[in-house]
Image: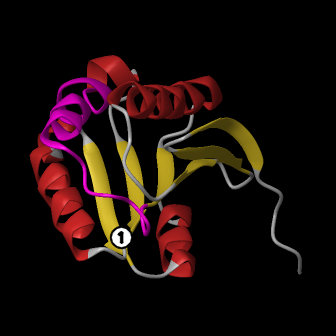
């Protein structure tokens, strides 16, 4: 059976935000350094897609993610992942683990900081397992 079609919602140097037909945002990060304003636009559009569709789930492909800078981590925690900015009480996030060890450590640190920000997440090394976990969420 063919894979369901993904629709591009937003694209910039940070990566692509796709609409998955199963009802979640699929965000794919590009490798390499980022500019903060590009990351802010990328995550803001991700939040807007979730709000527009009434979705509460996302699959983050961070396998090629370069480590977040301290400034990026702070912005993520302070702005994008707060319930007030997202307009949603809970987001379920399935995160594909980055290949680069330092990026994985950076991501783990950032995720540890946002537990109180109403994000329920789980790390995966398999896209199929991540998708299965999301299918089980409301």
Q: Is residue 136 magenta?
A: no
* Mark 1 burial class by Cα count in 10 Å: few <14, some 14-19, many 20+: many
Q: Nearer the viewer, residue 87 or 61?
A: 61
Q: Is residue 96 left or right of residue 102?
A: right
Q: Nearer the viewer, residue 52 or 40?
A: 40
Residue 97 location (% of width, % of height): 36, 72
Residue 71 location (% of width, % of height): 17, 33
Residue 100 in sight in this render: yes
Residue 112 location (% of width, % of height): 12, 54
- Can you say which quadrant of the picture contains the N terminus? bottom right
Q: Residue at label 1?
A: 98
Which quadrant holds residue 62?
A: bottom left
Q: Nearer the viewer, residue 50 or 111?
A: 111
Q: Is residue 81 magenta?
A: yes
- Magenta stretch, residue numbers: 62-82
Report the residue that reaches farthest toward the right: 1
Residue at 25 percent across and 23 percent down: it is 79
Residue at 22 percent across and 29 percent down: it is 75
Considering only vertical position in the picture, is 90 above or below 3? above
Q: Nearer the viewer, residue 76 or 122?
A: 76
Which quadrant holds residue 39?
A: top left
User: Element type at marker 1?
Assistant: loop
Residue 114 location (% of width, % of height): 17, 43
Considering only vertical position in the picture, is 127 above or below 6? below
């Amino acid at each position: 059976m063919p894979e369901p079609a993904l629709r591009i919602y937003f694209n910039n140097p940070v990566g692509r935000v796709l609409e998955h037909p199963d009802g979640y945002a699929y965000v794919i990060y590009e490798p390499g350094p980022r500019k903060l304003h590009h990351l802010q636009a990328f995550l803001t559009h991700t939040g807007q897609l979730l709000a527009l569709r009434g979705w509460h789930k996302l699959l983050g492909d961070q396998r090629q993610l370069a480590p977040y800078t301290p400034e990026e981590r702070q912005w993520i925690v302070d702005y994008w992942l707060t319930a007030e900015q997202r307009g949603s009480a809970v987001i379920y996030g399935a995160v594909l683990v980055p290949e680069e060890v330092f990026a994985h450590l950076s991501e783990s640190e950032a995720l540890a900081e946002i537990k109180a920000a109403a994000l329920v997440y789980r790390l995966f090394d398999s896209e199929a397992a991540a998708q299965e976990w999301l299918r089980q969420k409301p």
